[in-house]
Amino acid sequence: MTSPSQPTEELSIADLQRHIHQMYFEKDVARGVDGTFMWLMEEVGELASALRGNDKQNLAEEFADVIAWLATIANVAGVDLNAALVAKYGHGCPGCKRLVCECPNSEKP
Amino acid sequence: MTSPSQPTEELSIADLQRHIHQMYFEKDVARGVDGTFMWLMEEVGELASALRGNDKQNLAEEFADVIAWLATIANVAGVDLNAALVAKYGHGCPGCKRLVCECPNSEKP
């Protein structure tokens, strides 16, 4: 997907959300959360299909699409994804607080 | 969610995926893609529910959970989320190639 001679830049979650905001926010707000959630569900279905297939590039694209639609919904709902992820997962497993999860397998996750 | 005196660190997508890998990979591989996808669907349902509610902190946590489960599935499936996102969304809208999308509204997205 990327050339070995051109290392891929490391995108931050905040940058991604800002980038999606810049590209789509006007349309996203007009569509609203409910209409946008329908698009997310369509992409989740495509991800499920790609996970059953053998096309690695298509699979990567479907992951990107699902995350992009999540960022879109977060923009419309006014949620800061970076803050949300750092708060919940930035300091170990939310269940056992360890960096390598030791929660019992019966528990989620 | 975060104290104003402590600015939230900016997590990269690659760091998040590595962090989820460190915390959960052993369990994730044992569960496999199919079992993990079931957990993702449960979290998507919780996100839908939170989007209908008024609890902003809960909403942020549900976004974090959905993205964490996506990172988990990407780990099991061997997909580099950062590379996938940079390739598809790192250089403007995949449809019209513009930084502010000008695709017709009839088109996706």
Image (cartoon, coloured by chain):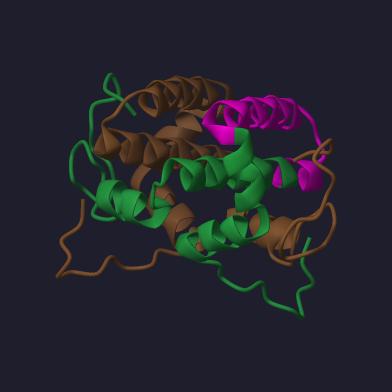
Chain colours: A green, B brown
Secondary structure mostly seen in magenta is helix
A103 sits left or right of B68 in the view: left
Where's residue A87, x and y in %? 26, 51
Please state which of residues B1 and A3 is positioned toward the viewer in this rendering: B1
Answer with left or right where residue B12 lies relative to residue A53: left
Q: Residue furthest front?
A: A30
Q: Which image quarter holds the N terminus of chain A?
A: bottom right
Q: State the image quarter where residue A94 is shown.
A: top left
Whether A58 is among the magenta residues is yes
Q: Looking at the image, is B22 positioned above or below residue A46? A: below
In the rendered image, residue A33, in percent from the top left (x then y), is placed at 53, 32
- The residue under the point 45% across, 20% down is B45
Residue A80 at least partly seen: yes
Q: Quadrant of the C terminus of chain A?
A: top left
Q: What's the magenta region?
A: A32-60
Residue found 23% across the figure and 38% down from its top: A102
Residue B71 visible in the shown view: no
Q: Where A67 sits versus A19, above or below?
A: above
Q: Give the mark count.
A: 0
For the view shown, which residue lies furthest in the bottom direction?
A: A5
Looking at the image, which is closer to me, B58 or A6?
A: B58
Picture coordinates of residue B74, whole percent (x, y): 58, 43
Q: Position of residue A74 (x, y in %)?
A: 47, 44
Q: Is residue A71 left or right of residue A2?
A: left
Decide whether residue B3 is among the magenta residues.
no
Residue at image location 74% in from the left, 63% down from the top: B92
Q: Residue at 60% x, 62% y: name it.
A: A19
